[in-house]
Image: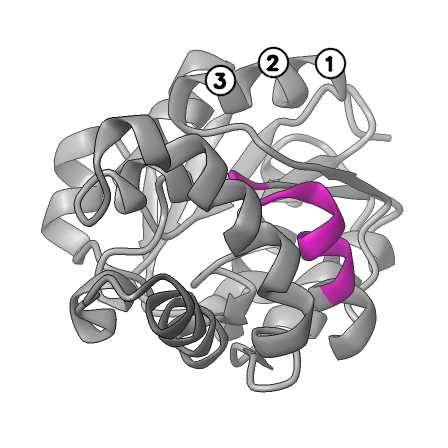
Amino acid sequence: MAPHPLTVGFDLDMTLIDSRPGIGANYRALSAETGVPIDTGLVVSRLGPPVEEELANWYPAELVAATADRYREIYPTHAITPTTALPGAREAIEAVRALGGRTLVVTAKHEPSARLHLDHLGIEPDELIGRLWAEAKARALIEHGAQVYVGDHTGDVRGARAAGALSVGVTTGPCDADELRAAGADVVLPDLTGFPAWLRAFEESRGGQG
C-alpha cells in the first residue's frame, strides 16, 4: 500500500480546460455592456490570476469589485459552451482514480462557474475548491492531503511548494517550461496526455500498488 492515500490536485483554466474562447467571449460582452475597450486577445494570453487582477488593467480601482461581480453574473451565459477540455484532462482524472486515489480541482475561478465547466465537460473530480490563487491554494492542498498539484502557471507552482506538494507543470497555459522550472516545478510535461504514465511511475516510487 502507499504510505498515504494518493491525492492529486489540479488547476482548472489552461490545465484541464481551454477556457480562452469562453473567457474571451465573456470579456467582449462585458466590454460591450460597460463601454470600456478591452483587448481580449491580451487577456486570454495571460490567464491564471483572479479576475479582479485582470480587470484592474481596464477599469478604475473603485469599479473593479462591482465589475468583477458583473463578470461572474454573465459568465454562465457566454463562457461555458465555447470552452473545451484540454487533451488528456479526463484521462488524467481517471488515472488517479484507477490507482485508488482522490482528485481535487483548486482554482482561482469563482466556484459556481468552475462547477458549470466541469459538469458541462464531464470532468468529475472528488472535490472542487474555488477562489484560491497562488500560495493561497496551499490551504486546500494541505487540508485535503494532496501530494501532487498540477498546473500551468507559476502561481500554481508556488501554491504546490507552499503546501509541500510535488509540483507538476504543464505548458498548455501562459508559462513555458523554463518559467515553470524557474518557479520550482519538480516535473514539466507538455500537456496532460503524458500524466497517467508519469503518475503510475510516481506511485510505484512511493510504494503504491498502481
Measured as percent of width and height from the top left, residue 93 is found at: 73, 60
Q: Earlier in the sequence, mark 1 or mark 3?
A: 3
Q: Are marks 1 and 2 in contact (CB under 8 Å)?
A: yes
- Give the x, y percent position of residue 152: 36, 52
Image point 63% across, 39% down: which residue? 9
As drawn, the residue found furthest toward the bottom would be 82
Q: Going by the image, does 108 lie left or right of 43?
A: right
Label 2 and label 3: CA atoms lie apart by 6 Å
User: Which residue in the protein does label 2 denote?
Assistant: 139
Q: Label 3: few (<14), some or many (≥20) within 10 Å?
A: some
Disc on res. 161? none
Where is 200 relative to 193, above or below?
A: above
Callout 2 environment at 10 Å: few (<14), some (14 to 19), or many (20+)?
A: some
* Residue type at numbered disc 2: Arg
Comparing 117 with 91, the one in front is 117
Specify whether residue 156 is in view.
Answer: no
Q: How far apart are labels 1 and 3 at the CA level?
A: 12 Å
In the image, what residue occupies the spot 30% across and 36% down? 53
Q: Closest to the observer: 12 or 60?
A: 60
Which corner quadrant of the image does residue 162 belong to? top left
Up the image or down, 92 lies above or below 188; here it is below
Q: Are marks 2 and 3 in contact (CB under 8 Å)?
A: yes
Asked if residue 187 lies left or right of residue 180, the reply is right
Q: Is disc 1 placed on a helix, strand or loop?
A: helix
Asked whether the residues under the numbered discs 1 and 3 touch, taking CB atoms below 8 Å apart as contact, a structural biologist would say: no
